[in-house]
Image (cartoon, coloured by chain):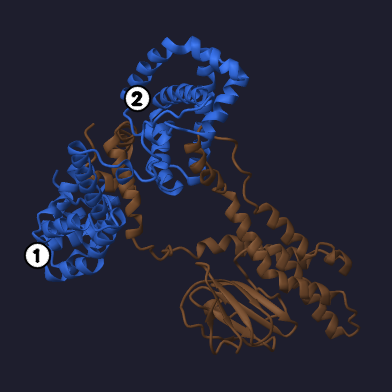
Chain colours: A blue, B brown
Amino acid sequence: MPIDAALAERLYRRARAGRWNVPVERFAEALERSAEGGANLDKLHLEDLALACGCAAGDEAAWEHFIREQRPTLYRAADALDAGGGARELADGIYGELFERSLFRYFHGRSSLATWLRAVLAQRHVDRLRAGQRLEPLPDDEFFPGSVGPAIGPAKAGPYDEEQHRCGELIREALTRAVAELPSRDRLRLACYYAQELTLAETGRLLGEHEASCSRHLARTRKTLRGHIERRLRDQHGLSEAEIADCFAASSEDPGELDLRQLLRMEPDSALRASSRQAREDRKESRDDRSTVRGRT
Amino acid sequence: MTCLDAETLAAWFDGGLSGAALEDVRSHVAGCVRCQALVGAMGRTRAAVPVPEPERSPRWWLAWAVPAAAAATAVAIWVAVPRPTNVALNSSPPSTLQKKDAQTAEPAEPPARAATPALQDRARSADAAPPAAAPVAENDAAKQAANGNVNESLSVRSAAPAPTAAAERRQEAERQGAVVGQLQARDAFTISPCGPMWPAPPTDVAAQITAGSAPSTDICWIVGRAGTVLRSTDHQTWQRVNIPQTVDLSRITATDARTATVMTADGRTFSTADGGVTWTQQ
């Protein structure tokens, strides 16, 4: 997609690309690549794009500027991802590719250079962890911060544990279904906030809403989920209001396998399949269990 | 849609996506575990980015125009309308105003019980986020507090008898100051924030003044953007007081001509006990 020469010239000046001795033609080529990638030229991070062009062309001043301004970001991001230094080698690898100039080609100016570097690092970190997980399962905490224990824990002994376990199962099944059936926007909001632990402001920014709206939407979604669970326990499993309240109380005391974050990490389809499978198994035992729950309450 | 590449992920985080591309990304990430993990990893690297200095829009001063006009109107109305008695002036003491604002700024009630314990943990922090109006109320409370000592001292003084014509004029000016101080409660001052009996701030900094404090009849400190600190002790001239950092100042509380505490826009406080010769960060 050829860029109009006057427009390229105007953007070149705005980017102050001359500082890095980037020829107008080369900058115009970078703009063309950005436009082909769907970028809005008026919203580009032009100065960063010019710096990337300068570095890619081997301009010493550009490279020095990049090292001074951007390299620390890369290494701070690596330390934030893995305080043990594991992500540092990824950062070294990225830095090496930047030094060889090959990587700059993939920067189109739709974000700042700093954000792009963080994204490149995040991508490699996640892919490495996922690859490692395929070979040998990693402790969940390492991949997902804030995870609470293993997905399936041993059933506890005791007279009331069976009831508690049963309540947990019912709620888990209903919650899995409720989460899977949420509109994708609500599900994304929950995933960003609860599973990935972004801040309200970050979550709101990704969804294009103010953090106060984001907070309200989260509250609404929680209410929806609870309503969905209550309905399912009442209509599908025949529990009374008192039994439902007891179930919630029991699950609050000991959530066991119940963890929204785990559920949000499942693809919606697989969550629904798992929920259906679980429901089938549950139905086999439902009569006995229902009488057990009623007997306790 | 395939999984996000780093460039698209970064563009999403920096608001560089729009339209169908943005919706595609949101829809994909909502159901993709890997991309959600990317989002999480991006969130965890947020500490890598230094917090930028707040950028001032080329037309930042326009934001002042509206409150400045409103303040001017308030003064004009006050001057034009027949003045009530001192009693009426003092009927709404600043402390009452401050209490009201403090109540407004109270945090929201704790959330209703969430669906699961995992939800509850984060729910607390989600619901603790104040609605958009809350910070404004908090700022107003802070501003009232900043004006409070001005209002209080002026209100008390206005109740005292003032037999001479000069004293009457002065008292009148003080009452105006007290009322204007109450009416303004915002960041702009067409007159000195200590009241109309004080000279207008120098023209080169007048538009930058944000707050003032008058610990007594004869002392007024005012602060503003870019480290502006001025003090007047003669009702005629302003002395510039140096502060070691060129930062925007949002509040000042002075106790006399030598002792004052200023608060920067980013929440730090500096105090001086020697008239501004030395400052200590709190």
**Residue B239 versus residue A179: which sits nearer the camera?**
A179
Q: Residue furthest front?
A: A158
Q: Residues within 10 Å of mark 1 (few under 14, many from 20)?
A: some
Mark 2–mark 1 CB contact (< 8 Å)? no
Please give the label number shown on residue A271.
2
Tell me if I can see residue A3 in this picture: no
The numbered mark, 2 or 1, whose residue comes first in the sequence reads 1
- Quarter of the picture holding the C terminus of chain B: bottom right
- Binning the other alpha carbons within 10 Å of mark 2 as few (below 14), some (14 to 19) or many (20 upward) gives many
Q: Residue at x 63, y 55 (%)?
A: B137
Classify A20 as above or below A133.
below
Q: Are marks 2 and 1 on the same chain?
A: yes
Q: Is residue A91 left or right of residue B194?
A: left
In which chain is the residue bearing label 1? A
Residue type highlighted by circle 1: Gly
Amino acid type, label 2: Ala
Q: Which mark is residue A278?
A: none
Element at label 2: helix
| Disc 1 target residue | A58
Q: Quadrant of residue B230?
A: bottom right
**B210 or A81: nearer the viewer:** A81
Question: Where residue A239 appears, x then y in whole percent?
Answer: 56, 15
The percent coordinates of residue A186 (x first, y second) are 43, 32
